[in-house]
Amino acid sequence: MKNVFTRCLWLWVVSFVFLLLTGCTMHVTKHISNKLDLDPIYASYNVQPTDLSLHSKCNDPPSVKIVNSESRIEDYKAFINPPFTGFINPKEMMDSVSLYLKNGFEKSRIKVDDQSSKILQLKMEDLRSTAGVWSFGGYFKMELIIPEMNFSKFYEATDNAGNGFSASAYVIHGVTRQIIDDPVIQDYILCK
């Protein structure tokens, strides 16, 4: 009996050391996307969307077309929790970011319409979540381009959360709120 216990313990120790030395990788795009739930995040940050359409100078109700211009589909390291590493697909991740931004604009009474002449193009610069001692730190940087105005601007945010997926969702939320609240973007969409 003692011999069986020793073998099991030895196998467990070898497996654990092997895991530490080799690490474990996983795709986390869907895990982060699942955390991008607008209502709970808005509630936790106490976001009270304003009705931006009240300030519109446009002839028609204000609308915007949001385009994901991210083309990278190769694995991108975005989640670091030794010995685990998480990868995202940047194009798929930006699809989720675009949807979250669309929902945010709609909460502010801006219609999202693929036929709108007001176009915002989005491209991911960096997304990462790193394990700390008690929590995860998140960082997100994104480029927003308005072709009509030859305008380009980077938005970035940092935040913390109890897990890496939430930390990533929170920084994405931070960036999308910066875009919605940016007076230059509002003036463009509201024809000012």
Image (tube, rainbow, N blue to C red):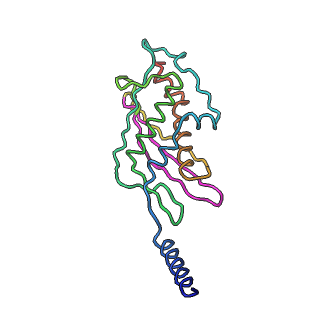
- Indicate whether residue 42 is drawn in magenta: no
Instruction: Give percent across and percent down for residue 109.
Output: 51, 21
Instruction: Give percent across and percent down for residue 38.
Output: 54, 35
Instruction: Give percent across and percent down for residue 133.
Output: 64, 61
Identify the residue at image location x=54%, y=15%.
54
Q: Residue furthest bottom?
A: 3
Count every numbered label the image shows and give the total. 0
Between 116 and 25, the one nearer to me in the picture: 25
Identify the residue at image location x=59%, y=54%.
136
Q: Quadrant of residue 116?
A: top left
Between 111 and 2, the one nearer to me in the picture: 2
Image quadrant containing the N terminus: bottom right
66 sits to left or right of 17 = left
Identify the residue at image location x=51%, y=72%.
20
From this view, report whether residue 17 is shown above or below residue 85.
below
Prevalent SS, magenta region: strand
**Residue extent of the magenta highlight:** 121-147
- Indicate whether residue 127 is drawn in magenta: yes
Q: Quadrant of residue 61?
A: top left
Instruction: Give percent across and percent down for residue 153.
Output: 47, 38
Identify the residue at image location x=48%, y=41%.
154
